[in-house]
Image: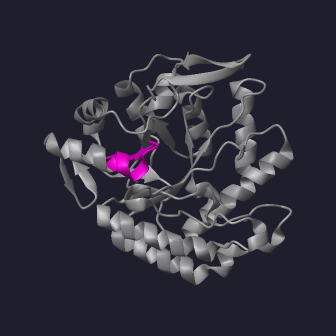
């Protein structure tokens, strides 16, 4: 029997939705302590749904690394007690947390200042999990970044950026294959050189797969980068299929042109047929946690779960079992 926690990212939109973090502008004095109050409400929702996996917003500690706002830089230390309390509750519930800094956190940038800024962001992300007292399953997911000068040079810059990190931040960092530049075969040698695992993104693999590997072939390559005793994590999404429309004013009339979605765009929900096939195939071989990247967030997860339970899968203690 294989077991899988399913998770969603940042937003809770069911039952009227919940705020994920303090989004006020700096002039209004946002703070991590307010974000943590909101996180408790999110944990309440996860408990009610029996969901045990969640991606935190990257800006949980607002402005924590902004160089022009040093007044925000000590939030993790200022909230040590509150973070410990959140961590205790997360551990009690058995929730797996992660974070995923976005496109502006580029550890392999050609610009040293950008690299240093990325390192500062990763330090804060790791420090949050450390202050919560969470184990090695709480990870910070990062793309390799830009490919200027070729893949080998880009990987070399990433290794240099990795050296900027403290040991604590390094222990939290994992890398992910992307949909344009660094496919799985490109990130695997980097993972070996820095000694950190790979989060396998299934849709990204379908978008960018230089070696033509099936998911059944690619998945174990990524899962084998994880240390014994730490359950691997992957990302899964379905491609958007809705036909869009572009409007252009021509004289006094509006001209409308159909726009086909790109393969890499995420759908609102998860295709239950494709996901079930993977559960009964490659995913059935090992326990692996799956972060669902769908625009409908918790609603997408619950809809998928209900379908799978109706198809004979069991959901117990926040895990899908087959």
Q: Nearer the viewer, residue 246 or 285?
A: 246
Residue drawn at (63%, 72%), measured in percent from left and top? 32
Residue 75 x/y as whole percent: 69, 74
Q: Indicate the quadrant where residue 210 lies.
A: top right
Residue 148 x/y as whole percent: 77, 27
The figure's colour scheme reads one colour
* Residue 1 in view: no
Instruction: Name the outermost residue toward the left.
Output: 312
* Residue 86 in view: yes
Residue drawn at (76%, 67%), measured in percent from left and top? 26
Q: Indicate the quadrant where residue 165 lies.
A: bottom right
Residue drawn at (29%, 32%), measured in percent from left and top? 278
Q: In this view, does 256 lie above or below 299?
A: above
Residue 198 x/y as whole percent: 51, 41
Q: In which quarter of the image is the C terminus?
A: top left
Residue 154 x/y as whole percent: 72, 32
Q: Nearer the viewer, residue 29 or 112?
A: 29
Q: Nearer the viewer, residue 199 or 297?
A: 297
Q: Is residue 13 left or right of residue 142?
A: left
Magenta segment includes 298: yes
Magenta segment includes 272: no
Count numbered badges in the picture. Answer: 0
Q: What stretch is highlighted in magenta?
A: 287-301
Instruction: Name the outermost residue toward the front.
Output: 252
Q: In this view, does 34 lie above or below 113?
A: below
């Amino acid at each position: 029997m294989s077991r899988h926690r399913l998770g969603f990212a940042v937003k809770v939109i069911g039952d009227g939705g919940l705020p994920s973090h303090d989004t006020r502008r700096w002039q209004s004095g946002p703070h991590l302590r307010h974000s943590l109050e909101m996180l408790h409400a999110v944990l309440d929702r996860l408990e009610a749904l029996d969901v045990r996996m969640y991606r935190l917003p990257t800006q949980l500690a607002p402005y924590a690394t902004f160089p022009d706002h040093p007044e925000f830089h000590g939030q993790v230390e200022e909230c040590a007690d509150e973070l410990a309390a959140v961590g205790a509750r997360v551990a009690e519930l058995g929730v797996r947390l992660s974070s995923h800094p976005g496109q502006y956190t580029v550890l392999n940038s050609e610009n040293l200042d950008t690299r240093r800024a990325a390192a500062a962001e990763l330090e804060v992300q790791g420090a949050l999990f450390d202050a919560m007292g969470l184990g090695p399953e709480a990870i910070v997911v990062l793309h390799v970044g830009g490919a200027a000068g070729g893949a080998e040079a880009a990987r070399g810059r990433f290794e240099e950026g990795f050296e900027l990190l403290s040991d604590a931040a390094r222990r939290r960092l994992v890398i992910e294959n992307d949909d344009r530049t660094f496919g799985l075969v490109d990130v695997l040698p980097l993972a070996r050189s820095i000694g950190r695992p790979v989060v396998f993104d299934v849709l990204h693999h379908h978008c960018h797969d230089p070696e033509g590997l099936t998911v059944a072939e690619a998945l174990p390559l990524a899962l084998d980068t994880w240390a014994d005793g730490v359950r691997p994590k992957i990302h899964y999404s379905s491609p958007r299929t809705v036909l869009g429309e572009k409007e252009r004013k021509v004289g006094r009339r509006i001209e409308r042109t159909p726009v086909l979605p790109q393969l890499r765009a995420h759908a609102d929900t998860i295709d239950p047929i494709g996901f079930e096939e993977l559960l009964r195939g490659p995913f059935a071989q090992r326990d692996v946690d799956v972060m669902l990247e769908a625009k409908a967030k918790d609603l997408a997860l619950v809809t998928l779960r209900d379908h799978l339970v109706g198809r004979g899968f069991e959901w117990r203690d926040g895990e899908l079992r087959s």
